[in-house]
Amino acid sequence: MFNLAAKPFDYLIVGAGFAGAVLAERLAAGSGKRVLLVDRRPHIGGNAYDYYNDAGILVHRYGPHIFHTNAERIWKYLSRFTTWRPYEHRVLANINSKLLPIPINLTTINTLYKLNLSSEGMQVFLAQRAEEPETIRTAKDVVLAAVGRDLYEKFFEGYTRKQWGVDPSKLDKSVTARIPTRTNTDDRYFGDTYQAMPKCGYTRLFENMLDHPNIKVMVNTDYREIVKSFRHDRLIYTGPVDEFFDYRFGRLPYRSLSFRHVTLDRPQFQPTAVVNYPSTDVPYTRITEYKYLTGQTHDQTSISYETPCDEGDPYYPVPNPENAVLYKKYETLAAKTPGVWFAGRLATYRYYNMDQVVAQSLALYSQLSELDGSLAQDERTKQSIVA
Ligand SMILES: Cc1cc2nc3c(=O)[nH]c(=O)nc-3n(C[C@H](O)[C@H](O)[C@H](O)COP(=O)(O)OP(=O)(O)OC[C@H]3O[C@@H](n4cnc5c(N)ncnc54)[C@H](O)[C@@H]3O)c2cc1C
């Protein structure tokens, strides 16, 4: 048992999502540090949190989280805390009540246009329709250049508008550049080497990660409530960076989501884990059926409707040039703030997947370990990490 009054903590870590939990685990188990990990939500796991609902079905509170990575190192590291359920994610898009594979592939094109193209035929088909903007700068440019206007309008325009609240022409190309177009029939959403779900869920993975005598976890606790009460040498912050600095330069825009979770008295609702709804006729962007992700068998099924909104928890940093400039100001300030380190999706204002957040946190851990050997270099090293 921890005696909270006895010794100061080496680290106060704000946020028990992947960023905070990986750093807590490494600092405690790898370096023998004493860590106080706080989260203002009533649970650990951050956005990856899952739980058994009243019907006994395992669901993801903050929408579907599928683990995928090409990095063997990240896969091996997380495998210390979970076994895996092999899972390849597949998504269908509802286009005028027809369910078609997304990312767009050969099946999508042949079914949508009632064709019988080969892979080569599809390449010619797309090349004839692709538009070549002068420069590819925006999310709209990327898609027009790859698949042309009709597919852009059917699959991307409405979805992206709903997701981000602005037209794709106002968003950075990175938003849609990550979605491939395939001229074969591969209908997997991700192409990564490692794709799987934690066998007993993400929350169990986090519990295993944080099960160390040097880690004290406090949930339902905003760090501002306790930061003066518990002495600590260093602070790692994984919440929104603008909030940390009391919005000194203004608010960084984030897109939020509202989730409506529903349990139905039938074993199955839809033919795949996720169905996207690109049409602006419905407010939600997608419906997820969780049993596909978890492999659970149950007489009932639980689904969630996901509706993007402006107000609420910050989920997605909005990538555009103005926001990049604003973030740069916070990044510079963060680099000059002694004794505080920033990590994770919100603190570095980046659209990171879970594996990328784990990689970023492991890199920060290495830097912090080095620093313990050469404190004089503290600020210099820190700046190279933040940059
Ligand atoms: C809908 C959705 C679906 C996603 N799907 C996938 C997917 O399929 N695959 C994938 O790889 N990635 C996915 N992601 C991304 C994934 O959620 C993130 O990469 C990951 O959760 C980021 O971890 P993090 O620790 O940086 O942030 P978070 O998980 O957001 O954790 C930050 C924590 O900090 C806490 N906090 C903030 N401020 C304070 C404060 N003042 N005091 C105390 N605590 C505070 C918050 O409560 C939060 O729990 C998805 C994200 C969303 C939103």
Image (tube, rainbow, N blue to C red):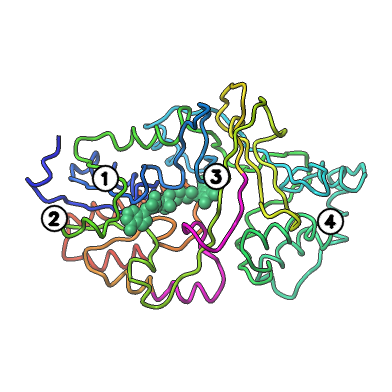
From the image, tell me which residue sits under label 1. Answer: 218
- In the rendered structure, which segment of residues is drawn in magenta? 305-329
The residue depicted at 59 percent of the width and 21 percent of the height is: 297
Q: Residue at x 35, y 47 (%)?
A: 16
Mark found first going from the N terminus, 2 or 1: 1
Question: Is residue 7 toward the left or the right of residue 177 in the image?
Answer: left
Q: State the residue in front, 96 or 331.
A: 96
Q: CA distance from mark 2 to mark 4?
A: 61 Å
On the image, the x and y values in percent for residue 62 come to 51, 46
The residue identified by callout 4 is 126
Q: Within 10 Å of the Cα at label 4, are there few (<14), some (14-19), or many (20+) other Cα atoms? A: some
Q: Residues within 10 Å of mark 3 (few under 14, many from 20)?
A: many
Q: Amino acid at mark 2?
A: Arg
Residue 63 numbered mark, or none: 3
Instruction: Report the side of 98 relative to 172 (left or right).
Output: right
Distance between the alpha carbons at the discs numbered 1 and 3: 24 Å
Q: CA distance from mark 1 to mark 4?
A: 53 Å
Foreground label between 2 and 4: 2
To which quarter of the image does residue 227 belong? bottom left
How would you rate the neighbour count of disc 2 (Cα within 10 Å): few for under 14, some for 14-19, many for 20 or more? some
Proximity of marks 1 and 4: CB atoms separated by less than 8 Å: no
Instruction: Check disc 2 and report the residue beneath it.
Output: 231
Q: In x, y percent, where is residue 330?
A: 38, 72
